[in-house]
Amino acid sequence: MQNRIQKITDSLDKNKAEAIEVFDLNDKNYIVDYAVIASSLGQKHTLALLNHLKDELKPQEHFNNVDESGDWVVIDLGDILIHIMTPEYRVKYDMETFLSELGGH
């Protein structure tokens, strides 16, 4: 699992995502074991980061579902959720507080 998380964070980092955080949600009664949150530089960058992840993680990872808008992309890998958000959306929806309250940080 840690290798998978490392591949995801490495891809995000090398493609200029900012403030990358990983939340370990094992044993927290949440829908996934891990959540990764990263900030993009803007709407086009959000979608570019999604495309980089698809290119770099497939075929090892199966993308169960991708919910995308320019401001927020959620990638469901089954046991890992990846959230890529513009800085404005990240502040507005404050996923870090929610996930931290689950005890995952």
Image: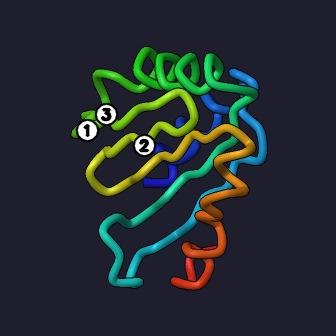
Assign the N terminus to one quadrant of the image: bottom left
Please tell me whether residue 89 is drawn above or below residue 105 in the rendered image: above
Residue 17 drawn at (x, y percent): 71, 32
Query: Which of the marked residues, 2 or 3, is nearer the chain's N terminus?
Result: 3
- Badges 2 and 1: C-beta atoms under 8 Å apart? yes
Please tell me whether residue 59 is drawn above or below residue 104 in the rendered image: above
Q: Amino acid at mark 2?
A: Val
User: For numbered disc 1, what is the local secondary structure?
Assistant: strand
Q: Residues within 10 Å of mark 2 (few under 14, many from 20)?
A: some
- Residue 46 quadrant: top right
User: For numbered disc 2, what is the local secondary structure?
Assistant: strand
Residue depicted at x 65% and y 64%: 94
User: For numbered disc 3, what is the local secondary structure?
Assistant: loop
Q: Amino acid at mark 1?
A: Asn
Q: Amino acid at mark 3?
A: Glu
Please tell me whether residue 30 is drawn above or below residue 83 in the rendered image: below
Q: Which residue is mark 2?
A: 74
Q: Residues within 10 Å of mark 1 (few under 14, many from 20)?
A: few
Query: Which of the marked residues, 2 or 1, is nearer the chain's N terminus?
Result: 1
Q: Which residue is mark 3?
A: 61
- For the residue pair 53 and 5, the one nearer the viewer reads as 53
Q: Which residue is mark 1?
A: 65
Q: Is residue 78 left or right of residue 30?
A: left
Give the CA distance from mark 1 to mark 3: 12 Å
Give the CA distance from mark 2 to mark 1: 8 Å
Residue 74 drawn at (x, y percent): 42, 43
Residue depicted at x 41% and y 83%: 28
Give the CA distance from mark 2 to mark 3: 15 Å
